[in-house]
Every structure is written in structure tokens, then in C-alpha cells.
């Protein structure tokens, strides 16, 4: 079973840059998408081909939005908002389906309507698949230096917001993993986590200790959700001693050409599923002008 995760940075832009061709050529069984960034009515007709769609667009127009594409209609769909756009192949309706509510861990309620999390129970494999778009965050107040930041100083508000999310999501993730196990399913969490876990996950790691996404407390949190008994970083387990493979590069300068990237897009799987991975890597385009997004798809083949 081929499973991919891809932050497409806007479905309409990704379509113009070759998303449909990639989908046909790679032929994944399941795709988790982040930053779809489109209202239901604005999704280009036919862009998802013959796949079933489960999509939580969120309340902020042009931002966020997470989806899962599957070959078969999923057995169940869950979102934090309690609603989703559910379409079969060829359907273009914009009706939102009401779903069974998901109890949220303390601290996540403020994020529930933002289009950051969707999970489905696959019909053709005993797996619960989730797509997550974790907030980018920012720097704590004491590291913010006016004139040296691309964004205006905010007194640490974006940083504190991300840390609230991480705190609540750790509890939610434990609940989701245990709930999947109680249903006889493995859990596969995929998505853009906006954290590079180790120095193998960011090219300029020495200069990144005071950069959001590689702060010590962020990396410590990431380590806390992984263990041989809970969740395994699948791509890293298949590439244990290499730098990368990176999945994000800035649009600016020569970052892509020089492979000055970050690995922030992940497959995190329960141990049994992680052991079933037989190939794992990043679909890095051959040249900067061929890029579909500032991220690249992360694709894993599982022998089930």
C-alpha cells in the first residue's frame, strides 16, 4: 500500500504546477494533504481524480485545510470541527456532512475550527490515517529582535499558541492511538508538523537553534511522542544515518538548488505498521521550476 503526505500550499496553485500528473504517476492508495486552502466550491473540478475525499476546510478562507484521499470510501471520518466535506469520485457538491463529535483534549478547543486535523478509518486495511497541519509558531519573546525578523515582533504570542497546541495535541494523540488500537487498527499520523526533530532534519542545524521549528523545547516535545512502543518516525527508521531527506525548502534564493532544506513532513506510525514499511522517501522535483509546492510529497510503501 503506497501512502503519501503532501503540504500542497494551495490546491489551485498545486494543480497549475502538476499535482494531477504527480497523482497519476505515483498512484498512491492514500494521500494526506495539508494547506489545501480552498473553500469547497473553489476546489478545481476533477483535481482529485478517482479518489474519495474527506476535507475539513476550516473557517479561515485561504488558509489551512486538511484532507485525506482514499481509493475506497472510508469506514469512518473524524474531524475536530465535527464536520467535513465528503465526496466520492466525480462528485462536485459542496454540502458539509455532520460527523460524530470527537472529544478534544484540554487546550485544543481554540484550534477545533481551523481545519488542522482529519482522520479516517480505511476500508481496505486495518489502519486509521490522520492528516495534521500543526501551527508554524514563532519565537519566544526573549529571542525576538526587531530588524532581524521577517515578521513583526508579537511578544511571543505565536510561540505561546504553538506550545498550547503541542501540549494539548500530545494528550489527543495518545487518545487517538489507544482508540485505534481498541478498534483493532494501527494509527498512521501524517502531515506538516513544522518541527525538525534532530540535526539530521535541517541542513543548517548549527544556526537554527534559535529559529522557530528547531527550538530545543519543540524538539524535546517531538521526542516525547516517539518511542519503540508508541509511534515511530517511519522515514527516519528507513534512513537512520543520513541528513534528510528534506521535505521543505524556502522559495527564496538557492535553497532548493543547494538542498538547504528542512524535514518537517512526517509519517508517524504505530510500531507494527512502521515495521511494514519497505520503501520511504521524498519526491523531490528535479529542478526548482518544476516544484509543485514549497514542500515535497513524502511517500512510503507499506507491505501489509
Image: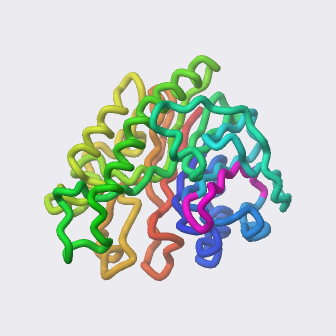
The figure's colour scheme reads: rainbow
- Furthest residue in direction front, as rendered: 155
- Does residue 60 show up magenta in the picture? yes
Residue 56 highlighted magenta (yes or no): yes
Residue name at image x 64 percent, y 52 percent = 67
Q: Which residue is drawn at 31% across and 69% down?
A: 259
Q: What stretch is highlighted in magenta?
A: 50-64
Q: Where is residue 244 drawn, in percent x and y?
A: 32, 55
116 above or below 172? below
Q: Identify the image quadrant of residue 107.
A: top left
Locate the N terminus by quadrant: top right
- Whether residue 296 sits left or right of residue 217 in the image: it is right
Q: Where is residue 169 in the image (x, y as percent from the top left)?
A: 45, 37
Say which of 171 and 299 sits in front. 171
Position above or below: 82 against 270: below
Residue extending farthest left: 206
* Image coordinates for residue 138, horizontal then vertical, percent: 31, 58
Determine the residue positioned at 42% across, 40% down.
Answer: 234
In the shown orientation, is residue 107 left or right of residue 68? left
**Residue 137, quarter of the rendered image:** bottom left
Q: Is residue 41 toward the left or the right of residue 267 in the image?
A: right
Q: Nearer the viewer, residue 237 or 207?
A: 207
**Residue 194 percent coordinates (x, y):** 38, 54
- Tell me the quadrant of the picture where the C terminus can be found: top right
Amino acid at each position: 500500500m503506497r501512502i503519501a503526505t503532501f503540504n500542497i500550499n494551495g490546491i489551485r496553485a498545486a494543480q497549475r504546477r502538476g499535482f494531477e500528473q504527480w497523482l497519476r504517476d505515483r498512484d498512491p492508495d492514500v494521500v494526506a494533504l495539508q494547506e489545501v486552502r480552498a473553500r469547497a466550491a473553489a476546489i478545481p473540478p476533477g483535481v482529485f481524480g478517482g479518489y474519495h475525499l474527506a476535507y475539513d476546510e476550516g473557517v479561515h478562507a485561504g488558509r489551512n485545510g486538511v484532507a485525506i484521499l482514499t481509493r475506497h470510501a472510508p469506514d469512518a471520518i473524524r474531524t475536530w470541527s465535527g464536520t467535513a466535506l465528503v465526496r466520492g469520485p466525480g462528485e462536485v457538491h459542496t454540502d458539509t456532512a455532520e460527523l460524530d463529535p470527537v472529544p478534544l483534549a484540554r487546550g485544543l478547543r481554540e484550534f477545533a475550527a481551523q481545519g488542522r486535523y482529519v482522520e479516517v478509518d480505511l476500508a481496505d486495511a486495518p489502519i486509521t490515517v490522520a492528516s495534521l497541519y500543526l501551527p508554524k509558531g514563532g519565537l519566544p519573546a526573549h529571542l525576538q529582535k526587531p530588524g532581524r525578523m521577517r515578521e513583526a515582533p508579537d511578544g511571543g504570542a505565536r510561540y505561546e499558541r504553538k506550545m498550547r497546541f503541542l501540549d494539548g495535541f500530545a494528550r489527543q494523540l495518545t487518545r487517538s492511538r489507544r482508540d485505534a488500537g481498541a478498534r483493532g487498527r494501527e494509527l498512521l499520523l501524517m502531515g506538516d508538523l513544522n518541527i525538525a526533530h534532530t540535526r539530521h532534519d535541517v541542513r543548517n542545524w548549527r544556526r537554527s537553534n534559535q529559529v522557530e521549528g528547531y527550538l530545543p523545547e519543540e524538539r524535546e516535545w517531538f521526542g516525547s511522542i516517539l518511542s519503540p512502543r508508541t509511534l515511530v518516525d517511519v522515514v527516519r527508521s528507513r534512513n537512520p544515518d543520513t541528513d534528510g531527506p528534506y521535505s521543505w525548502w524556502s522559495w527564496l534564493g538557492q535553497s532548493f538548488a543547494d538542498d538547504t532544506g528542512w524535514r518537517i513532513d512526517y509519517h508517524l506510525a504505530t510500531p507494527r505498521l512502521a515495521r511494514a514499511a519497505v520503501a520511504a522517501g521524498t519526491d523531490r522535483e528535479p529542478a526548482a521550476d518544476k516544484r509543485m509546492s514549497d514542500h515535497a510529497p513524502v511517500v512510503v510503501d507499506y507491505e501489509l
